[in-house]
Image (tube, rainbow, N blue to C red):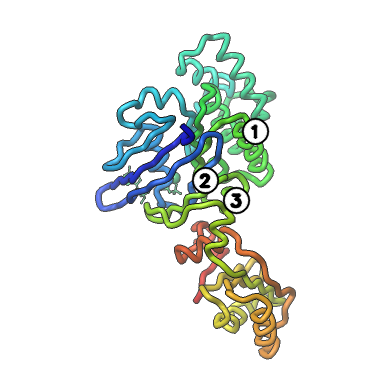
Amino acid sequence: MTAAIEVDEVSKRFGATVALDAVSFTVDVGTVLALLGPNGAGKTTLVRVLTTLLVPDSGHARVGGFDVQKDARTIRSMIGLAGQYATVDELLTGRENLELVGLLYHLDKELYRTRAQEALERMSLASAGDQQVKTYSGGMRRRLDLAASLIGQPPVLLLDEPTTGLDPRTRNDLWGFIEELVAEGTTVLLTTQYMEEAEHLANSIVVLDSGRVVAKGTADELKDRLGGNVLEVRVNKRADLDRAASLIANFGNGPSRTNPDLNQVLLPIRDGASVLIAAGRALQDHGVALDDLGIRRPSLDDVFLAITGHTTDTHAVEAGNTEISR
Ligand SMILES: Nc1ncnc2c1ncn2[C@@H]1O[C@H](COP(=O)(O)OP(=O)(O)OP(=O)(O)O)[C@@H](O)[C@H]1O
Ligand SMILES: [Mg+2]
């Protein structure tokens, strides 16, 4: 058996909301699959199905060859879960939280004490292990949550947005921990809204949007699917940004994206050099001063935008960091 997780035509509705619509994919043993999608895509719903907490309306899901509905008990003993919202007890210390998890796994006292200490060390929490969790920062809580998922030494880890809200350094640390576990043979399914995270950690990526799988493959395969390149324009003055976007719009094969913080416009294009020259000329003819003009390979963000018509980071859209225009 090479598939650690098999999801076969799984559907789930909540009233009129279709949270999962015939979702299928597999995750090979010892690999990382990233389930990528914006808010409401269905990521947590799928994690809940795989952890046996939610029964699908139709379809089948198996973990380690066991059916989530028929063999729920077995599956619970072989998975570790770190949920989207850290589920640690505020009043207990970090160590007590971990030992409690060991108790729930029916481990011997000596064993769960050893594993709690190991997990604290692994997550760089050893010095804070005997403080109450209410004194922990958000990043420390996330690390403790991940530590808790390791106590049972499960072969399959399900991590729901493990790094959301973490600062870049803490996020990098967590990526490192996940990579170590995978190197030791653990299978990981993680959900994320960050392209970068999927690109960094995942062997394969499933893109969900409104409950449907809209793309599947490695990061490179998804980029190849988009084809072509991305034209990147940096204007000298913020005031020129929208004008620059409309001046180059005709050269694109999809909608452009402006990033006001960086004075930047990104436009998917089919060609390379000829578009670069033509776009540069058009901007110059209209007196738009440039800081930079270039071509690069598409990022997964570009791919997601091309597939779904919106970016993954809905928060950024709301905050006005990323605007989509035609
Ligand atoms: N228990 C529930 N009752 C009703 N609707 C639900 C329930 N759980 C999820 N939904 C709906 O199902 C859809 C998918 O939700 P889900 O939580 O799986 O998305 P998500 O991809 O995890 O989003 P986020 O990135 O915000 O965590 C959403 O429209 C959500 O409102
Ligand atoms: Mg979620």
Q: Secondary structure at mark 3?
A: helix
Q: Where does residue 262 sit, x and y in percent of width and height?
A: 67, 67
Ligand 2 quarter of the rendering: top left
Question: Which residue is identified by label 3?
Answer: 199
Q: Which mark is residue 180?
A: 1
Whether residue 15 sits left or right of residue 262 in the image: it is: left
Q: Where does residue 144 sit, x and y in percent of width and height?
A: 58, 30
Alpha carbon of mark 1 to alpha carbon of mark 2: how far? 16 Å
Q: Residue at x 55, y 51 (%)?
A: 218
Q: Is residue 159 above or below residue 227?
A: above
Image quadrant in which you'd find residue 223: bottom right
Alpha carbon of mark 2 to alpha carbon of mark 3: how far? 9 Å
Furthest residue in direction left, as rendered: 15
Q: Amino acid at mark 2?
A: Ala
Q: Residue at x 46, y 36 (%)?
A: 3
Q: Is residue 198 above or below residue 117?
A: below
Q: Residue at x 46, y 25 (%)?
A: 78
Q: Residue at x 57, y 71 (%)?
A: 268
Q: Nearer the viewer, residue 137 or 263?
A: 263
Q: Which mark is residue 158?
A: none
Examine the rendering and report whether any part of residue 253 can be seen. Answer: yes
Image quadrant in which you'd find residue 121: top right
Q: Is residue 218 above or below residue 179?
A: below
Q: Secondary structure at mark 1?
A: helix
Question: Which residue is identified by label 2?
Answer: 34
Furthest residue in direction bottom, as rendered: 285
Residues packed near mark 3 inside 10 Å, few (<14), some (14 to 19) or many (20 plus): some
Q: Secondary structure at mark 2?
A: strand
Residues packed near mark 1 inside 10 Å, few (<14), some (14 to 19) or many (20 plus): few
| Ligand 2 has an atom within 8 Å of the beta carbon of the residue at disc 1 | no
